[in-house]
Image (cartoon, helix red, strand yellow):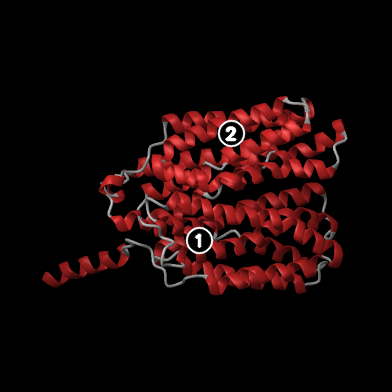
Amino acid sequence: MSSDAIGATTRWSMVAVALVLTASAFSFIYATPFLIPALESSRATPLSQSGLLAAMPSLGMVVTLITWGYVADLVGERIVLTIGSSLTAAAAYAASTVHSLVAMGVFLFLGGMAAASCNPACGRLVAGWFPPQQRGLAMSIRQTAQPLGIAMDALVIPDLAEHGSPNGGLLFPALACAVSAVVAAVVAHDPPHKPRAQAHPDELASPYRGSSVLWRIHALSALMVMPQSMTVTFMLIWLRADQGWSRQSAGILVAVTALLGALSRMAAGRWSDRIGSRMRPIRLIALATSVSMMLLAFTNEHHPVAVLLMVAVSVITVMDNGLEATAITEYAGQFWSGRALGVQNTGQRLMTLAGPPLFGAVIGAFGYPVAFALCAIFPLAAAPVVPTGLEVPGFVDRRSTGWLAENEVNTRE
């Protein structure tokens, strides 16, 4: 059965499933920063220790992303998502009940190892259910799960932590991941994959062998994630410290910017579907990110246009998020896409971990303009790495084929 023959309701319901599961996983990954005020006020936890706790889930993800992708390639998405969400829920609950910060850190690390299952498995789930002409939009919608998970945390966790134990806020991602495990077990369905026994040897062979395409996509994705890390980490602080905005006003602008970023991801996915290329939009996005970041660096930081440029940079720099993941699943193929997505996410996660300390040090020593200029180098370096000649496998421009069919009918008449 081809993916074109699958009903639209089934396909889009799998996007909803992937969105719920991924948002729940990211709710756990990014929960700890929202506990920091409560940890500081009730336990006098130093910022260095609470910052280390906040990094533990991401460190756990780095360890297992490729392994979960390999398992998804072998056994399918539903099993991986059910087990991974269940283990994440258990780790989150355990972390919410312990008093020792060391024990809490251990459970956060273990939870990150489990939550990593959602990235490759959900990517495979969505990509497998959609034809090439719709896959970019569907995958980009799934990519909005990260800001959605963070938004849920921001609304719920601080109140839970304030009115209960400092780490009691982790009960929210524990519940979310428990619900996700049930959703995965009951609602998720693996795409109609070809059985491994019927696959041609070329389909089972490593897509990394004899080609640099996947490595180039991994490299450009790692470079492109650096400005994202910069803006996500420092936009709120920049608005308050350098622009003099109030906490409420800055928070509202950050939230609106995140929403615009989510919409920009979907627009980029739809754009790639229409032109039959994931790579050509990425090169343009990389150049636009670099130019806008450099403009921000050379704009007087107290000029009103500086805030508009910061919003523009924050929106543009996340546009490519779904495109690389879509290209990975298409080029790696059914039997390798999980592992390839694991490699992809590992590189991005490592850059995300390195970005804030690097730019924090630059900002402390030289100020924001120098940090913005330095950050502009990363997307500029990514642009020539983009394999723009890579086309979408199986893509059919339905506008042109529809026009040809109509033309043939008119000619016969």
From the viewer's perspective, is 360 left or right of 137?
Answer: right
Name the one closer to the observer, 206 or 407.
206
From the viewer's perspective, is 70 left or right of 369?
Answer: left
Q: Is residue 326 visible?
A: yes
From the viewer's perspective, is 156 left or right of 76?
Answer: right
* Residue 205 percent across, percent down from the top left: 36, 57
Crowding around mark 2 (Cα neighbors within 10 Å: few <14, some 14 to 19, many 20+) is many
Kind of residue at badge 1 = Ala
Crowding around mark 1 (Cα neighbors within 10 Å: few <14, some 14 to 19, many 20+) is many
How many angstroms separate mark 1 from mark 2 (CA)? 31 Å
Which residue position is annotated with label 2? 88
| Above-or-below relation of 164 to 402 | above
| Above-or-below relation of 49 to 281 | above
From the viewer's perspective, is 168 left or right of 145?
Answer: right
How many numbered dots are placed on residues in this image? 2
Q: Residue at x 66, y 27 (%)?
A: 94
Please identify the quadrant where the C terminus is shown.
bottom left
Which residue position is annotated with label 1? 268
For residue 90, which quarter of the picture? top right
Q: Residue at x 59, y 33 (%)?
A: 88
Q: Residue furthest left?
A: 412
* Residue 190 percent across, percent down from the top left: 37, 40
Name the one closer to the observer, 211 or 260.
211
Kind of residue at badge 2 = Thr
Q: Given contact means CB atoms under 8 Å apart, are the residues at marks 1 and 2 in contact? A: no
Name the one closer to the observer, 307 or 79.
79
Q: Residue at x 55, y 75 (%)?
A: 384
Q: Residue at x 43, y 67 (%)?
A: 211
